[in-house]
Amino acid sequence: MILGIETSCDETSVALLNDQGEVLSNVVASQAIHELYDGVVPELASREHVQKMLPVLDRALAEADVGLDDVDAIAVTSGPGLVGSLLVGVTTAKGLALARDLPLLGVNHLEAHALSPFLEARDLEPPVLVLVVSGGHTLLVHVKALGELEVVGRTRDDAAGEAYDKVSVMLGLGYPGGPELERLAKNGDATAFDFPRSWLEPDTLDFSFSGIKTAVRVVLDRDEELRREPRSRDVAASFQAAVVEVLVTRTLAAAERLGVPSVAIAGGVAANGALRSAMETACRETRRRLVIPRLAYCGDNAAMIAHAGKLRLDRGERSDFSLDAQPNLPLGDVPNRAPSRKKRPR
Ligand code: KG4
Ligand code: ZN
Protein backbone atom coordinates (compact mmCIF):
# COMPACT_ATOMS: atom_id res chain seq x y z
CA MET A 1 0.00 0.00 0.00
CA ILE A 2 1.33 3.43 -0.97
CA LEU A 3 0.38 6.73 0.66
CA GLY A 4 0.41 9.82 -1.57
CA ILE A 5 0.66 13.46 -0.48
CA GLU A 6 -0.07 16.52 -2.65
CA THR A 7 0.39 20.15 -1.50
CA SER A 8 1.87 21.91 -4.56
CA CYS A 9 -0.67 24.75 -4.73
CA ASP A 10 -3.91 25.30 -2.82
CA GLU A 11 -5.22 21.77 -2.32
CA THR A 12 -4.16 19.62 0.63
CA SER A 13 -4.61 16.02 -0.42
CA VAL A 14 -3.74 12.54 0.86
CA ALA A 15 -4.59 9.26 -0.88
CA LEU A 16 -4.05 5.55 -0.38
CA LEU A 17 -3.47 3.10 -3.21
CA ASN A 18 -3.32 -0.65 -2.67
CA ASP A 19 -0.83 -3.05 -4.29
CA GLN A 20 -3.18 -3.59 -7.24
CA GLY A 21 -3.11 0.16 -7.88
CA GLU A 22 -6.71 0.67 -6.72
CA VAL A 23 -7.58 3.94 -5.01
CA LEU A 24 -8.80 3.24 -1.46
CA SER A 25 -9.18 6.89 -0.51
CA ASN A 26 -8.43 10.28 -2.05
CA VAL A 27 -9.18 13.15 0.33
CA VAL A 28 -8.87 16.65 -1.14
CA ALA A 29 -9.28 19.74 1.07
CA SER A 30 -9.55 22.96 -0.94
CA GLN A 31 -8.70 26.40 0.43
CA ALA A 32 -11.56 28.87 0.17
CA ILE A 33 -9.52 31.78 1.59
CA HIS A 34 -8.01 32.67 -1.81
CA GLU A 35 -11.43 33.66 -3.20
CA LEU A 36 -11.08 36.87 -1.19
CA TYR A 37 -8.00 37.83 -3.21
CA ASP A 38 -8.99 36.67 -6.75
CA GLY A 39 -5.98 34.34 -6.82
CA VAL A 40 -3.77 32.09 -4.72
CA VAL A 41 -1.79 33.91 -2.01
CA PRO A 42 1.29 31.71 -1.47
CA GLU A 43 1.86 32.54 2.20
CA LEU A 44 -1.78 31.83 3.09
CA ALA A 45 -1.65 28.60 1.10
CA SER A 46 1.30 27.22 3.06
CA ARG A 47 -0.29 28.13 6.40
CA GLU A 48 -3.52 26.35 5.44
CA HIS A 49 -1.53 23.29 4.38
CA VAL A 50 0.07 23.20 7.84
CA GLN A 51 -3.36 23.33 9.49
CA LYS A 52 -4.98 20.76 7.21
CA MET A 53 -2.19 18.24 6.66
CA LEU A 54 -2.72 15.97 9.68
CA PRO A 55 -6.55 16.04 9.69
CA VAL A 56 -6.52 15.17 5.96
CA LEU A 57 -4.02 12.37 6.57
CA ASP A 58 -6.21 10.95 9.37
CA ARG A 59 -9.31 11.12 7.18
CA ALA A 60 -7.59 9.39 4.26
CA LEU A 61 -6.51 6.53 6.53
CA ALA A 62 -10.00 6.29 8.07
CA GLU A 63 -11.77 6.28 4.69
CA ALA A 64 -9.44 3.55 3.43
CA ASP A 65 -10.01 1.72 6.73
CA VAL A 66 -6.26 1.20 7.25
CA GLY A 67 -3.58 2.37 9.69
CA LEU A 68 -0.06 3.70 9.15
CA ASP A 69 1.19 0.16 9.88
CA ASP A 70 -0.36 -0.96 6.59
CA VAL A 71 1.56 1.61 4.53
CA ASP A 72 4.61 0.34 2.61
CA ALA A 73 5.82 3.52 0.88
CA ILE A 74 5.31 7.31 0.88
CA ALA A 75 5.00 9.34 -2.34
CA VAL A 76 4.94 13.13 -2.33
CA THR A 77 4.88 15.97 -4.85
CA SER A 78 8.30 17.63 -4.71
CA GLY A 79 7.66 20.06 -7.57
CA PRO A 80 6.83 22.09 -9.52
CA GLY A 81 4.68 24.35 -7.36
CA LEU A 82 4.74 27.01 -4.68
CA VAL A 83 7.80 26.48 -2.52
CA GLY A 84 6.10 27.05 0.85
CA SER A 85 3.21 24.75 -0.09
CA LEU A 86 5.49 22.02 -1.41
CA LEU A 87 7.58 22.13 1.77
CA VAL A 88 4.61 21.16 3.95
CA GLY A 89 4.04 17.99 1.92
CA VAL A 90 7.72 17.13 1.55
CA THR A 91 8.51 17.53 5.27
CA THR A 92 5.42 15.50 6.24
CA ALA A 93 6.43 12.73 3.83
CA LYS A 94 10.02 12.70 5.03
CA GLY A 95 8.88 12.61 8.65
CA LEU A 96 6.60 9.66 8.01
CA ALA A 97 9.18 7.79 5.93
CA LEU A 98 11.91 8.35 8.53
CA ALA A 99 9.76 7.44 11.54
CA ARG A 100 8.38 4.30 9.88
CA ASP A 101 11.49 3.35 7.90
CA LEU A 102 9.59 3.39 4.60
CA PRO A 103 10.74 4.10 1.04
CA LEU A 104 10.26 7.73 0.02
CA LEU A 105 9.28 8.68 -3.54
CA GLY A 106 9.48 12.25 -4.79
CA VAL A 107 6.95 12.78 -7.59
CA ASN A 108 6.88 15.41 -10.34
CA HIS A 109 3.41 17.00 -10.20
CA LEU A 110 3.22 17.38 -14.00
CA GLU A 111 4.25 13.77 -14.56
CA ALA A 112 1.48 12.72 -12.16
CA HIS A 113 -1.10 14.75 -14.13
CA ALA A 114 0.18 13.29 -17.42
CA LEU A 115 -0.04 9.74 -16.04
CA SER A 116 -3.50 10.21 -14.45
CA PRO A 117 -5.28 8.80 -17.55
CA PHE A 118 -3.56 5.48 -16.77
CA LEU A 119 -5.01 5.58 -13.26
CA GLU A 120 -8.47 6.02 -14.78
CA ALA A 121 -8.22 3.54 -17.65
CA ARG A 122 -6.26 0.56 -16.43
CA ASP A 123 -6.12 -0.95 -19.94
CA LEU A 124 -4.67 2.20 -21.54
CA GLU A 125 -1.25 1.64 -23.05
CA PRO A 126 1.41 4.06 -24.27
CA PRO A 127 1.99 5.84 -26.55
CA VAL A 128 -0.58 8.45 -25.53
CA LEU A 129 -0.71 12.17 -26.24
CA VAL A 130 -1.82 13.93 -23.06
CA LEU A 131 -3.06 17.53 -22.86
CA VAL A 132 -2.28 18.69 -19.31
CA VAL A 133 -4.40 21.76 -18.83
CA SER A 134 -4.80 23.50 -15.47
CA GLY A 135 -4.58 26.85 -13.72
CA GLY A 136 -0.79 26.67 -13.63
CA HIS A 137 0.06 24.64 -16.74
CA THR A 138 -0.82 23.95 -20.34
CA LEU A 139 1.37 21.25 -21.87
CA LEU A 140 1.24 18.58 -24.52
CA VAL A 141 3.00 15.50 -23.23
CA HIS A 142 3.97 12.54 -25.38
CA VAL A 143 3.86 9.54 -23.02
CA LYS A 144 6.06 7.11 -24.97
CA ALA A 145 6.28 4.67 -22.06
CA LEU A 146 5.19 4.96 -18.43
CA GLY A 147 8.69 6.13 -17.48
CA GLU A 148 9.41 8.09 -20.66
CA LEU A 149 7.61 11.40 -21.10
CA GLU A 150 8.42 14.18 -23.52
CA VAL A 151 6.91 17.66 -23.55
CA VAL A 152 6.13 18.44 -27.21
CA GLY A 153 4.26 21.72 -26.69
CA ARG A 154 3.60 24.21 -23.89
CA THR A 155 2.09 27.62 -23.28
CA ARG A 156 4.49 30.50 -23.75
CA ASP A 157 2.56 32.78 -21.41
CA ASP A 158 -0.69 32.12 -19.52
CA ALA A 159 -2.06 28.66 -18.80
CA ALA A 160 -5.54 28.02 -20.23
CA GLY A 161 -7.05 27.79 -16.72
CA GLU A 162 -5.31 31.03 -15.81
CA ALA A 163 -6.97 32.72 -18.81
CA TYR A 164 -10.35 31.36 -17.63
CA ASP A 165 -9.66 32.66 -14.13
CA LYS A 166 -8.59 36.11 -15.31
CA VAL A 167 -11.54 36.56 -17.68
CA SER A 168 -13.83 35.35 -14.92
CA VAL A 169 -12.50 38.05 -12.59
CA MET A 170 -13.09 40.64 -15.38
CA LEU A 171 -16.72 39.47 -15.57
CA GLY A 172 -17.09 39.69 -11.78
CA LEU A 173 -17.46 35.92 -11.36
CA GLY A 174 -14.71 35.58 -8.73
CA TYR A 175 -11.89 33.05 -8.39
CA PRO A 176 -11.32 30.31 -9.43
CA GLY A 177 -13.78 31.12 -12.16
CA GLY A 178 -13.48 28.30 -14.70
CA PRO A 179 -16.69 26.50 -13.69
CA GLU A 180 -18.65 29.79 -13.34
CA LEU A 181 -17.46 31.01 -16.73
CA GLU A 182 -18.48 27.71 -18.30
CA ARG A 183 -21.94 28.02 -16.73
CA LEU A 184 -22.31 31.57 -18.07
CA ALA A 185 -21.14 30.49 -21.55
CA LYS A 186 -23.84 27.78 -21.78
CA ASN A 187 -26.56 30.25 -22.74
CA GLY A 188 -24.36 32.54 -24.80
CA ASP A 189 -23.68 33.00 -28.52
CA ALA A 190 -20.17 31.70 -29.27
CA THR A 191 -20.08 33.58 -32.58
CA ALA A 192 -20.90 37.00 -31.06
CA PHE A 193 -17.23 38.00 -30.78
CA ASP A 194 -14.40 36.82 -32.98
CA PHE A 195 -11.67 36.58 -30.34
CA PRO A 196 -8.17 35.82 -31.66
CA ARG A 197 -6.86 32.27 -31.91
CA SER A 198 -3.09 32.40 -31.39
CA TRP A 199 -1.66 29.85 -33.77
CA LEU A 200 1.95 31.14 -33.45
CA GLU A 201 4.36 29.71 -36.06
CA PRO A 202 3.05 27.08 -38.50
CA ASP A 203 5.13 24.19 -37.11
CA THR A 204 4.87 24.80 -33.41
CA LEU A 205 2.82 22.79 -30.93
CA ASP A 206 3.05 25.62 -28.37
CA PHE A 207 0.15 27.70 -27.07
CA SER A 208 -0.40 31.34 -26.18
CA PHE A 209 -3.40 32.60 -24.19
CA SER A 210 -2.37 36.10 -23.14
CA GLY A 211 -3.60 37.71 -26.38
CA ILE A 212 -7.17 36.48 -26.00
CA LYS A 213 -7.29 37.68 -22.41
CA THR A 214 -6.27 41.16 -23.57
CA ALA A 215 -8.78 41.04 -26.43
CA VAL A 216 -11.57 40.30 -23.94
CA ARG A 217 -10.46 43.21 -21.77
CA VAL A 218 -10.49 45.60 -24.75
CA VAL A 219 -14.01 44.54 -25.72
CA LEU A 220 -15.26 44.89 -22.12
CA ASP A 221 -13.68 48.33 -21.74
CA ARG A 222 -15.58 49.52 -24.81
CA ASP A 223 -19.01 48.64 -23.46
CA GLU A 224 -19.67 48.24 -19.73
CA GLU A 225 -22.95 46.41 -20.43
CA LEU A 226 -20.92 43.43 -21.64
CA ARG A 227 -19.73 42.80 -18.08
CA ARG A 228 -23.29 42.01 -16.99
CA GLU A 229 -25.84 39.39 -17.89
CA PRO A 230 -27.33 38.73 -20.32
CA ARG A 231 -24.63 40.14 -22.65
CA SER A 232 -21.72 38.74 -20.63
CA ARG A 233 -22.95 35.28 -21.71
CA ASP A 234 -21.88 36.00 -25.29
CA VAL A 235 -18.45 37.17 -24.14
CA ALA A 236 -18.00 34.00 -22.08
CA ALA A 237 -19.19 31.72 -24.90
CA SER A 238 -16.98 33.42 -27.52
CA PHE A 239 -13.95 33.31 -25.21
CA GLN A 240 -14.51 29.64 -24.46
CA ALA A 241 -14.97 28.76 -28.15
CA ALA A 242 -11.59 30.34 -28.99
CA VAL A 243 -9.71 28.61 -26.16
CA VAL A 244 -11.27 25.21 -26.82
CA GLU A 245 -10.64 25.43 -30.58
CA VAL A 246 -6.92 26.08 -30.02
CA LEU A 247 -6.56 23.34 -27.38
CA VAL A 248 -8.31 20.69 -29.49
CA THR A 249 -6.67 21.61 -32.80
CA ARG A 250 -3.15 21.59 -31.33
CA THR A 251 -3.71 18.32 -29.45
CA LEU A 252 -4.95 16.55 -32.56
CA ALA A 253 -2.13 18.03 -34.66
CA ALA A 254 0.39 16.66 -32.16
CA ALA A 255 -1.24 13.20 -32.14
CA GLU A 256 -1.27 13.19 -35.94
CA ARG A 257 2.34 14.34 -36.27
CA LEU A 258 3.64 11.81 -33.74
CA GLY A 259 1.41 8.99 -34.99
CA VAL A 260 -0.14 8.42 -31.55
CA PRO A 261 -3.43 6.48 -31.50
CA SER A 262 -4.71 7.61 -28.08
CA VAL A 263 -5.39 11.03 -26.61
CA ALA A 264 -6.10 12.08 -23.02
CA ILE A 265 -6.92 15.29 -21.15
CA ALA A 266 -5.71 15.86 -17.58
CA GLY A 267 -5.68 18.79 -15.12
CA GLY A 268 -8.44 20.99 -13.70
CA VAL A 269 -9.66 22.39 -17.03
CA ALA A 270 -10.44 18.81 -18.18
CA ALA A 271 -13.65 19.35 -16.16
CA ASN A 272 -14.81 21.76 -18.87
CA GLY A 273 -17.77 20.33 -20.79
CA ALA A 274 -17.09 22.28 -23.99
CA LEU A 275 -13.50 21.03 -24.11
CA ARG A 276 -14.57 17.46 -23.39
CA SER A 277 -17.22 17.36 -26.09
CA ALA A 278 -15.06 19.10 -28.73
CA MET A 279 -12.23 16.64 -28.01
CA GLU A 280 -14.68 13.72 -28.14
CA THR A 281 -15.88 14.79 -31.58
CA ALA A 282 -12.34 15.34 -32.90
CA CYS A 283 -11.17 11.95 -31.63
CA ARG A 284 -14.22 10.15 -33.01
CA GLU A 285 -13.64 11.71 -36.43
CA THR A 286 -9.97 10.67 -36.45
CA ARG A 287 -10.67 7.26 -34.86
CA ARG A 288 -8.58 7.90 -31.80
CA ARG A 289 -9.27 6.61 -28.32
CA LEU A 290 -9.94 9.41 -25.84
CA VAL A 291 -9.49 9.07 -22.07
CA ILE A 292 -10.59 11.78 -19.66
CA PRO A 293 -10.07 10.84 -16.00
CA ARG A 294 -12.97 11.33 -13.57
CA LEU A 295 -13.09 14.79 -12.02
CA ALA A 296 -11.50 13.62 -8.76
CA TYR A 297 -8.34 12.71 -10.69
CA CYS A 298 -8.35 15.84 -12.90
CA GLY A 299 -7.88 18.62 -10.34
CA ASP A 300 -4.94 18.50 -7.97
CA ASN A 301 -5.23 15.27 -5.98
CA ALA A 302 -3.00 12.82 -4.14
CA ALA A 303 -4.31 9.69 -5.89
CA MET A 304 -2.37 10.68 -9.01
CA ILE A 305 0.72 11.29 -6.85
CA ALA A 306 0.46 7.86 -5.21
CA HIS A 307 -0.08 6.34 -8.68
CA ALA A 308 3.01 8.02 -10.20
CA GLY A 309 4.99 7.14 -7.06
CA LYS A 310 3.96 3.50 -7.32
CA LEU A 311 5.13 3.37 -10.95
CA ARG A 312 8.54 4.72 -9.80
CA LEU A 313 8.66 2.24 -6.92
CA ASP A 314 7.74 -0.67 -9.23
CA ARG A 315 10.68 0.32 -11.44
CA GLY A 316 12.96 0.00 -8.41
CA GLU A 317 13.42 3.75 -7.95
CA ARG A 318 13.24 5.77 -4.76
CA SER A 319 14.32 9.14 -3.41
CA ASP A 320 16.75 9.71 -0.56
CA PHE A 321 16.35 12.11 2.33
CA SER A 322 17.98 14.95 0.43
CA LEU A 323 14.57 15.26 -1.29
CA ASP A 324 13.52 18.91 -1.16
CA ALA A 325 10.82 21.18 -2.56
CA GLN A 326 11.72 21.95 -6.19
CA PRO A 327 9.47 24.84 -7.28
CA ASN A 328 10.63 24.72 -10.91
CA LEU A 329 11.15 21.00 -11.38
CA PRO A 330 10.80 20.44 -15.16
CA LEU A 331 8.95 17.44 -16.52
CA GLY A 332 11.44 14.69 -17.21
CA ASP A 333 13.78 15.63 -14.36
CA VAL A 334 14.10 13.12 -11.56
CA PRO A 335 12.89 14.62 -8.25
CA ASN A 336 15.87 14.95 -5.91
CA ARG A 337 18.00 17.37 -7.83
CA ALA A 338 18.84 20.83 -6.54
CA PRO A 339 16.04 23.33 -7.28
CA SER A 340 16.57 25.82 -10.08
CA ARG A 341 16.17 29.52 -9.39
CA LYS A 342 13.48 30.50 -11.89
CA LYS A 343 9.92 31.26 -10.73
CA ARG A 344 7.00 28.98 -11.57
CA PRO A 345 4.85 30.89 -14.07
CA ARG A 346 1.39 31.42 -12.60
O1 KG4 B 1 -5.48 21.25 -11.78
P1 KG4 B 1 -6.12 22.30 -10.94
O2 KG4 B 1 -7.10 21.87 -9.87
O3 KG4 B 1 -5.06 23.19 -10.22
C1 KG4 B 1 -3.91 23.69 -10.83
O4 KG4 B 1 -4.03 24.78 -11.41
O5 KG4 B 1 -2.86 23.01 -10.76
O6 KG4 B 1 -6.84 23.30 -11.97
C2 KG4 B 1 -7.56 24.42 -11.54
C3 KG4 B 1 -7.91 25.24 -12.77
C4 KG4 B 1 -8.44 26.63 -12.45
O7 KG4 B 1 -7.82 27.55 -13.32
C5 KG4 B 1 -9.94 26.49 -12.76
O8 KG4 B 1 -10.54 27.71 -13.12
C6 KG4 B 1 -9.91 25.53 -13.91
O9 KG4 B 1 -8.92 24.58 -13.55
N1 KG4 B 1 -11.20 24.87 -14.09
C7 KG4 B 1 -12.00 25.06 -15.18
C8 KG4 B 1 -13.17 24.30 -14.95
N2 KG4 B 1 -13.04 23.67 -13.73
C9 KG4 B 1 -11.84 24.04 -13.23
N3 KG4 B 1 -11.81 25.77 -16.29
C10 KG4 B 1 -12.80 25.75 -17.20
N4 KG4 B 1 -13.96 25.07 -17.05
C11 KG4 B 1 -14.19 24.33 -15.96
N5 KG4 B 1 -15.33 23.66 -15.82
ZN1 ZN C 1 -2.03 20.56 -11.01
Image (spheres, grey):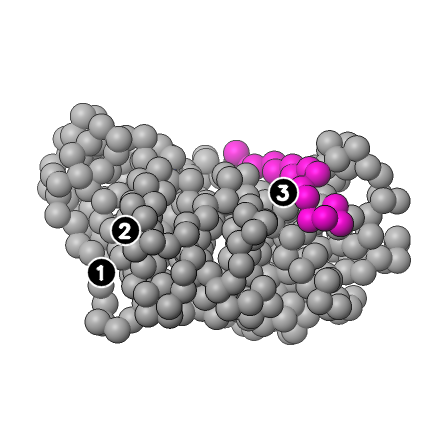
Q: Nearer the viewer, residue 44 or 142?
A: 142
Residue located at (22% from left, 72% from top): 201
- Look at label 1 and name its amino acid: Ser
Residue 66 in the image: x percent, y percent? 82, 37
Mark 2 residue element: helix
Whether 23 is among the magenta residues is: yes
Label 1 SS = loop
> What's drawn in magenta, residue-wise?
18-32
| Mark sitting on residue 285 | 2
Whole-percent x and y of residue 338? Answer: 64, 74
Q: Where is residue 63, by image quadrant? A: top right
Q: Mark 3 points at which residue?
A: 12
The residue sitting at the front extreme is 287
Residue shown at 61% from the left, 36% from the top: 29
Occupied quadrant, residue 337: bottom right
The one nearer the camera, 322 or 246, is 246
Q: How far apart are marks 1 and 2 (CA)?
A: 24 Å
Residue occupied by mark 1: 198
The numbered mark, 2 or 3, whose residue comes first in the sequence reads: 3
> Is the C-beta of the residue carrying label 1 under 8 Å from the nearest atom of ligand 1?
no
